[in-house]
Amino acid sequence: MRIRINEPFFGDEEANNVIKVLRSLKLTSSSYEGGEMVREFEGKLRDYLGVKDVVAVNSGTSALLASMMAIGLKPGDEVLVPSLTFGATANVVLALGGRPVFVDIDLDNYTMSPEDARRKVTERTKALIPVHLFGHLAKMDELLELAEEKGLYVIEDACQAIGSVYKGRKAGSIGELGCFSFYASKPITSGEGGAVATNDEALADRLRLIRNQGMRKGYDYETLGLNLRMPEIEASILSVQMDRLEGFIEARRRNARLLSEGLDGLGIELPKELEGMRYNWYLYTIATEDRDGLLNHLNEKGVEARVYYDPPVHLSGLYSKRDIRLPKTEYASKRILSLPVHQKLDREAMSKIVELIKIFIRKGK
């Protein structure tokens, strides 16, 4: 039995919705409002998050890019970003001529350190992008306080955190903008796809224009935009996946509990939900000294454990020429290992992962 790091689930409902779109011949829409299935999906996500508006786009990267364009990011503007994340978070800033300023993490949740963020703010800082990594939630109270004090936008990168909850508020609903991804590995997926959530009507209007080449009606280009539209087939799948989301999260939370119970007391650093938070457990990420040895052991035995992210973004080729030191990020990147915890796994799979880790630890003693 091979245990994959993530695996999507689709049923007859998704297939039937796709067939419905194909038979309609309405595969996409260049209207400002979006197509029928796009609007249906946006409404479900909007209601789930408890926000005023959701704008669907074609990827999580597009969600971040559209958000940067919507806040008016200009060349030379600085945006605070973590480095322990997927490169898109920094790349969209660079693509618009901005300067990503890398912020260290806190080791208790692997997300942006509010203390280090405060040190990195300058007169050129426009925004900060906390990433809710692995479904863990950034310390939003402190980050929002900093942003209000300095007059900064807060764009949540919730691409890995749909359904995670911070003190009663869903991830992606807390800052001015919240970005989501529906890539194939995510808790709900259509293969690709993204969305931006907001409570700001003016930002929502700009986002709809930006995803549609700047067009509101006909070929009148009101602003700079791109083709960032979500196709109707993707939206038809996501509309059904939204109905499954809470069930998926409960299965992930059950599996995370089984791992925590089974791995307790083995000398491994286990992830813990901070007070007042609920994680969606996109990934279950442990830390251990012999990370690479355990990784190879699990992979050889059929468990698809993965390392996210080594090297961190600031040490990758594109950014490594800068003289940047992020000691906690660099420390974590060499020690953390993500384990499968997705909704298609059962108790037997969790037991296998636990037993294999116990075998590895016994051999090392």
Image (cartoon, helix red, strand yellow):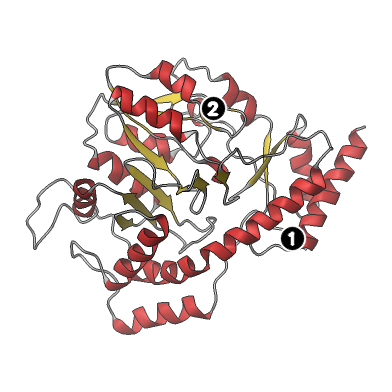
Q: Mark 1 highlights which residue?
A: 2
Q: Where is residue 13? Give x, y as percent.
A: 49, 79
- Indicate which disc residue 264 carries: none
Q: Where is residue 34? Give x, y as percent.
A: 24, 65
Task: Give the vertical position of 176 relative to 75 (above or below).
Answer: below
Q: Residue at x 58, y 58 (%)?
A: 249
Quadrant of the snapshot with the N terminus? bottom right
- C-alpha span from label 2 to label 1: 33 Å
Quadrant of the snapshot with the C terminus? top right
Of labels 2 and 1, earlier in sequence is 1
Q: Secondary structure at mark 2?
A: strand
Residue 99 can be seen in this image: no
Q: Residues within 10 Å of mark 1 (few under 14, many from 20)?
A: few
Name the residue nearer the viewer: 18 or 284: 284
Nearest-to-viewer mark from 2 and 1: 2
Task: Give the vertical position of 79 relative to 43 (above or below).
Answer: above
Q: Residue at x 52, y 55 (%)?
A: 186
Residue 152 can be seen in this image: yes
Three-letter code for the amino acid on which mark 2 is drawn: Ile
Q: Mark 2 highlights which residue?
A: 105
Apparent side of residue 83 relative to residue 346 in the rendered image (left or right): left
Q: Residue at x 28, y 73 (%)?
A: 36
Three-letter code for the amino acid on which mark 1 is drawn: Arg
Apparent side of residue 44 relative to residue 283 in the rendered image (left or right): left
Q: Secondary structure at mark 1?
A: loop
Name the residue nearer the viewer: 312 or 55: 55
Q: Residue at x 38, y 53 (%)?
A: 59
Q: Where is residue 364? Give x, y as percent.
A: 89, 34
Task: Give the vertical position of 288 relative to 15 (above or below).
Answer: above
Apparent side of residue 164 relative to residue 353 in the rendered image (left or right): left
